[in-house]
Image (tube, helix red, strand yellow):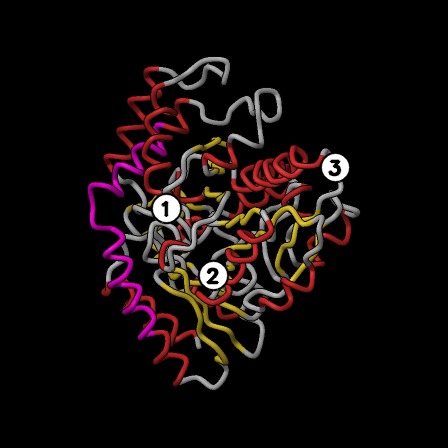
Amino acid sequence: MQKYIDEAESVLLHTYNRYPIVFDHGDGVYLYDIEGKKYLDFVAGISVFAFGYNNKEYNDALKNQIDKIIHTSNYYYNVPAIEAAKKLTKVAQMERVFFTNSGAEAVEGAIKAARKYAYLKDGSTDHEIIAMEHSFHGRTMGALSVTGNPKYREAFGPGIGNIKFAVMNDLESVKAQITDKTCAIMFETIQGEGGIHPATEEFLRGVRKICDEKDILLILDEIQCGMGRSGYMFAWQKYNVKPDIMTVAKALGCGIPIGAFLLTERVAQKSLVAGDHGTTYGGNPLATAAADKVLELFEETNIIENVKEVGAYLYEELDKLAASNENIVAHRGQGLIQGLEFNQPVGDIINKALAKGLVLINAGTHIIRFVPALIVTKEDIDEMISILRTCL
């Protein structure tokens, strides 16, 4: 293992402080390193592997597509993209979709669509977008510009410009940033990297009302909290506060790189047209075959009911853990996206857990994030809690 790690450090750009493990394969909610050690995984590739590792139906769908065709470009139609688009727009309750290669690219497309929508209204290019403090939308320049954490942005300024930041769940702070140049208000329905902060119903409805009154677009980022993780296919569906544009990725492909941004028909007809946006790989047959199978599995299984039931159990068990440990100061989240906030950095706890065969991840320096595969069971929760207790 160390030989591989040393080789990686000699050739890969060091933009990640990786844990000293080389994973080899996975099965269900477990990962195995190249030396055969078994790990209970509560990260799922950062909310990616909804159906766990080595799902046979998913694997077979990819193998079948590889034997047919992998890529043709967007100058032509392909059946997997059409089938995936039909399924995704149906569950998203939206009418149009553009497939990308990642979540960050989905955010870039959403920003462009919002600015084009505003441009077509008045011919101006100085429109503003309001994003949220402590948000995370990706590492590309546009996505970084709407990410509400200065430490991610400071070395890469000035960004795309005309971005303002308000406070999540503080409607008055949003109102204070609105001008006649505001074209969009954008936030994660449940903040992930920023500390697992769900948007409240009052906040969602309040922002939606403002957007309706002023013809401002509501963009909801469901890249991490979407695809069933909240206990709903998309977290906004809990309150039925529909966005004008939505971004999705991660579990959409369950490991194959794919993202998407979706638009209502009204916005689609008044924003991007041929020549405004594109991608060589986005929506190719292999990636969309993965998404099509994932969406089919969501249709055919009761996975979201499992998220609600097991997510509630996880909440109860984490509450008990928080009550028994004075270093835990908060517990937040819903479904299978939850977090424990500590009064100290959590790096040592995560390292101890890893040594004991439990894979965890942080969300900021003081928060442990729990985002297991959606197939996780109560027994898996019990195993995780038992290991975590010994680490604490």
Q: Position of residue 290 (x, y in %)?
A: 35, 32
Which residue does the image show at 41% across and 50% down from the upper left? 226
- Would you say residue 311 sits in the magenta stretch? yes
Q: Residues within 10 Å of mark 3 (few under 14, many from 20)?
A: few
Q: Is residue 368 left or right of residue 183?
A: left
Q: Which residues are magenta?
A: 289-317
Which comes sooner in the sequence, label 2 or label 1? 1
Q: Position of residue 297 (x, y in %)?
A: 25, 40
Quadrant in which residue 270 is drawn: top right
CA distance for labels 1 and 3: 42 Å
Q: Quadrant of residue 91?
A: top left
Residue highlighted by disc 3? 124
Residue 107, percent from left and from top? 57, 42
Q: Amino acid at mark 3?
A: Ser
Q: Which residue is mark 2?
A: 205
Of tags 2 and 1, which is closer to the observer?
2
Q: Is residue 348 magenta?
A: no
Q: Outermost residue toward the front?
A: 213
Residue that badge 1 annotates: 49
Do callouts 1 and 3 mark residues in contact (Cβ within 8 Å)? no
Could you tell me which secondary element the residue under label 3 belongs to?
A: loop
- Badge 2 amino acid: Arg
Of the residues shown, which amino acid type is indicated by label 1?
Phe
Q: Secondary structure at mark 2?
A: helix
| Residue at the spot 27% in from the left edge and 69% down from the top edge | 313
Q: Image point 39% across, 44% down: which residue?
A: 251
Q: For the residue labelled by badge 1, is the local secondary structure a helix, a strand or a loop?
A: loop
